[in-house]
Amino acid sequence: MSSDSSTGKSPPKKKNVKYEQKFVNSWLKDDRFKGWLKKSIKGETYFFCSACNCDRKCGIHELLRHKDSTKHAKNSLKLQKQQKLTSMFTSASNSQDAKIAAKAGEVKMACFIAEHNLSFNIASHLNKLICAVCPDSKIAEQLSISRTKARAIIVNVTGQTAEENIIEMLQNNCFALLVDESTDKSTIKHLALVARIVKLDFSVEDRFLTLIPIVDGTATALYGKIVEYFVEKNIPYKSNMIGFASDGANVMFGDKHSLVTLFKNDIPHLFTMKCICHSFNLCASYACEKLPRGVEDFCRDVYNHVQNSPKRIGDFKTFQAFTNIKPHKLLHPSQTRWLSLIEVVNRLLEQLPAIKLYFQAAVHVDRLLSAQSILSKALEPTTELYLEFLKFALPIFTDLNKEMQSETPKLYLLYDKILTAYTTILECFVQAEYLNLTEQEKNEAQNILHAKETKILNLDFSSEQKHLPMQHIYVGGMVTNLIRRKTEIGELEEEQLKNFYLKCKEFYIEAAKQILKRFPFDDKDRQALKCLKMLNPKAILDSEIKKKFPSIADLHYFFPKICPNNITELDREWRMLRNVDFSFDQNKTPDIIDFWKHVQELRNGDESQTFPTLCELVKKLLCLPHSSAAVERLFSAINIMKTKLRNRISTTTIKGVLHTKSEITDCYSFEATEKHMKKFNKNMYDFKNKNECENIEDEAIENETEK
């Protein structure tokens, strides 16, 4: 019996506890309940249906039952058709964003056409292609560009913005002007202007400025066109222009009346520089004229005979394979490419065994009369000697030429580079006793390096008494070995060898004369170049070299327009800089840009700049030009752009493309700025000016056709 039996009472019944489901937040993410399910304010055990506007008890089965009810289905359909007020604003905003993005996309498409020198006719097909590839893109739907719009964007949006940016720089900073003139495919003569500027971080840039069509190529006419452009663009050239460079043509650098003399009348103490690349190319050209004409004829004849016939090219490849020589194409000397001759010489020496076999077959098998003279030159023993000699001698000019085509500052190195080339040439044919100091001269000299330099520059190298014996003239190591080999087998006669050494000596003498003619070391301008060596970090970091430059006063004498009047403050900063303990690697001299950028970042205790006057001076000096290679590259770009198929492209359009390309790194990464978008409107379609420019060129083309 139970314990409650004595009392006669039955045990109490247990109550059934009713469980109530609380609202679960994960239901809101369930796709079945999205759009109408919400939490109820009635309590945690209820849910709210926004479609039916009612509260119901929570539970997954209750949710599914309510979702499948007829009432909920009708109310949900009404809710889907109803447009919310917020969605109206969102839709309008998305549409406006798509239009803006489409405009930016059209600018990128125009930049793509400009960067890759494509025809404007490609624009409409490019537009349709993007729409076909991206049919679901809202931005692609808004794209609408054809050739007229593409040209308008390049000329009056991106091109005009780039021109305004460079003009603003020239209005507020010092610059150097690089000038040259050339005639394009449609016989229109252009005057190209390139500005050399230095940024705040000491980096140097050569930026395209403008392209001016000219008819009269006199110095007065060119000067008038340039000044007219500066005045029109409000560029204070008389105060901001500190340097000028071009080729050595009389119209540019004549002593009496030239573009340089006219500018110097307006700008006293203007720094002027004949292009180093042009000058050294002329030095090499005049020196090569002293060699037998047959060497150059051989270079041209081999190319003209083989490369103009597909059959001969195929036959020549057979001999290349037979002699196990790489199947490289033959090259020919170019009249306009500075560095082409050395490449031609190297290629001929590489292919010489195959050339000899090919022309032997052409003479004896094919019995070609035109190949007989070429074969005679190929088998002549001195031909290979002259080619090997040129392979040794030409890099003296071409290596310096190549280095001076760089945009980075090289002017501070120029004096030493030219002196090194000049000394190297003299050592090849002048006796050492006339180039080196004697013991007595060393004892008497205060500065041995300066004394040796003076002795070399004052040397009369044309005197026969000072020349080396004929067979001791240095003509290159490979040539010396070839002479020994050919002499041993009796292939080279004594008279031929004597004549070879004589011609090589004449080459050296003419090269030395041309260097002195174009770079007179005693001239004031060349002494100014020597003074610029103090910009070299070595002049500050090297304990021996910095003894040569105790003061910066010489710069004030040679560059009065650039140096500030407060020479005392400048000189004090210079002498302080020479005693700063820099943390650069002792075994590696820093780059000139990195060095002066580091100097600019040095600060005093009050956070003021330590060398402000000196840094401003260095920026101006780095802006001075050493060549006009940038303008030559510009004309190469124009020749790629203006071809036989695009010979009617106007000067205005060419300017727009060049300006656009000057600000593009990659067309796909280019971003349209606020300036671009402001110009992107109906006013960019300047049909009047476009037609005028094209009519001028059409007339020139028609006149040329009639001739």
Image (cartoon, helix red, strand yellow):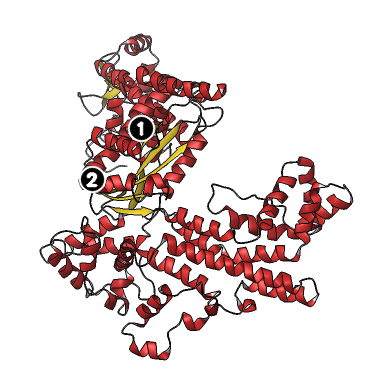
Vertical arrangement, residue 661 with respect to residue 432, above or below: above
Of circles 2 and 1, the one toward us is 2
- Residue sitting at 49 percent across and 34 percent down? 184
Secondary structure category for the residue under label 2: helix
Q: Quadrant of residue 707?
A: top right
Amino acid under label 2? Answer: Asp
| Residue situated in front as seen by the camera: 19 or 678 | 678
Mark sitting on residue 140:
none
Query: Residue 505 location in percent, x, y?
Result: 59, 70
- Residue sitting at 33 percent across and 28 percent down? 157
Vertical arrangement, residue 97 with respect to residue 614, above or below: above
Amino acid under label 1? Answer: Gly
Residue linked to disc 1: 159
Give the CA distance from mark 2 to mark 1. Answer: 30 Å
Q: Is residue 566 left or right of residue 378?
A: left
Looking at the rendered image, the quarter that the N terminus falls into is top left
Residue 609 visible in the snapshot: yes
| Residue situated in front as seen by the camera: 566 or 300 | 300
Q: Quadrant of residue 94?
A: top left
Residue linked to disc 2: 266
Badge 2 crowding class, 10 Å Cα cut-off, few under 14, some 14 to 19, many 20 or more, is few
Quick one: label 2 or label 1, which is nearer the N terminus?
Answer: 1
Secondary structure category for the residue under label 1: helix
Query: Residue 706 location in percent, x, y?
Result: 56, 21
Query: Residue 102 location in percent, x, y?
Result: 38, 24
In the rendered picture of this protein, how many numbered marks are placed on residues? Answer: 2
Circle 2/circle 1 CB separation < 8 Å = no
Residue most toward the left?
606
Query: Residue 168 location in percent, x, y?
Result: 24, 39
